Structure formats: structure tokens, C-alpha cells
Amino acid sequence: MFTLKSVVAGLAVAGATLAVQAKDIVDTAVAAGNFKTLATALQAAGLVETLKGKGPFTVFAPTDEAFAKVPKEQLDTLLKDKAALTKVLTYHVVPGKVMAKDVKAGKVKTVQGTELTVATAGGVMVDGAKVIKTDIVADNGVIHVIDSVVLPK
């Protein structure tokens, strides 16, 4: 027979189990607090569900400060053009989970289809954007923070 006390205890355990669920790349970025523009852009491009998917993904994530370097008119135009926005955002994503210790200089194929150029001399650079924080692990990949938005050629 169930008592009120046992039901409440059971619900508390179930709630605690849900609270420790791992976060995907999108939830991890949102929780960090400095990727609001990226989150808005992912929503506008319809890519939230993709980056919440199985993966694994490696995301070179521009901060809000990085997006602030893009002229406002250009950013506003990009946010309204879903196809162009998708192209730019998927250019920041590499298939697989590449940790900082595994990064090598050279060309890396992106989800967008073209290649990023990675340089490692004097710190890691991705198409001229400096990697300012590495290895933010999510349950479906990893985020490396960059200081600029990179654009496909």
C-alpha cells in the first residue's frame, strides 16, 4: 500500500533524476549566458533541433561580443535570410567531437560543406578567429569559443 509519504519520496527521486540530465550543445551554450545572439540565430535558421540531435558535433561558437563586431545592418539582414544564415552557422560546425588536444593545423570540412582553415602557431585560430576557450563538453559534442564570426568563402 502506498502512503502519501512514499509517493512524495518517489516523486522527489524522479525529479532529482530529471534534474541531472546531461545538456546538449544548444542548452550548454544558452546556460553559459554569453551566446544569446548565437541562440537567436540558431532559432531563426531552424537549427536548434539539429544541434540538440545525436551528433557528435564540434561547434566553434562566436560569443555575443563576436557578433557585436558584425555591422548591425549586416547582422540584421543575415538574421532575416534563413538560407544565408544557415550557411554561416553550419560553417561553424564540424562533424565529430574534436577536443583541443586533438586539433591540428590544416583544412577541416564543415557541416556547411566547405572547409575552415585551422592554424595552431601562437594559439589556435579558425579562419582568423581566435579560439578563446576550449573543450566545453556537451552530451552530443563539444564547444570551442571564438572571438569573431567566420564567414564561408
Image (cartoon, helix red, strand yellow):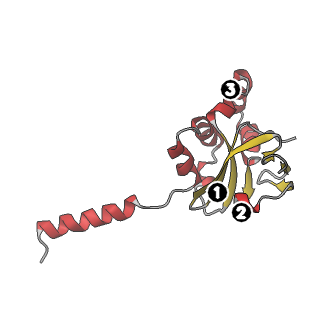
Tag 3's secondary structure? helix
**Mark 1 or 3: the one toward you:** 1
- On the image, the x and y values in percent for residue 8 come to 19, 64
Placement of the N terminus among the 4 image quadrants: bottom left
Q: Is residue 135 left or right of residue 19?
A: right
| 134 and 68: which is toward the camera | 134
Name the residue rendered at 57%, 38% in the picture. 34
Q: Residues within 10 Å of mark 1 (few under 14, many from 20)?
A: many
**Pointer 1 or 3: first along the chain:** 3
- Residue 113 lies left or right of residue 37; in this view the side is right
Q: Position of residue 124 (x, y in %)?
A: 78, 48
Task: Look at mark 1 in the image and give the residue it sits on.
Answer: 142
Q: Give the mark count.
A: 3
Q: Nearer the viewer, residue 127 or 82?
A: 127
Residue placed most toward the observer, 69 or 50: 69
- Nearer mark to the viewer, of 2 and 1: 1
- Amino acid type, label 2: Gly
Q: Is residue 73 above or below residue 33?
A: above
Task: Tell me if label 2 and label 1 are in contact, CB under 8 Å.
Answer: no
Depth check: 120 or 128 in front?
120
Secondary element at tag 2 = loop
Name the residue located 61 percent from the left edge and 35 percent from the top edge.
37
Q: Quadrant of residue 42?
A: top right
Mark seen at residue 59: none
- Badge 1 marks a residue whose secondary structure is strand
Q: Which residue is mark 3?
A: 76
Q: Please tell me how crowded label 2 is: few (under 14), some (14-19), or many (20+) other residues with Cα within 10 Å.
A: some
Report the residue at 83% width, 55% height from top: 108
How far is disc 3 from disc 2 in space, using C-alphas? 31 Å
- Tag 2 residue: 96
Task: Give above or below for 76 relative to 48.
Answer: above
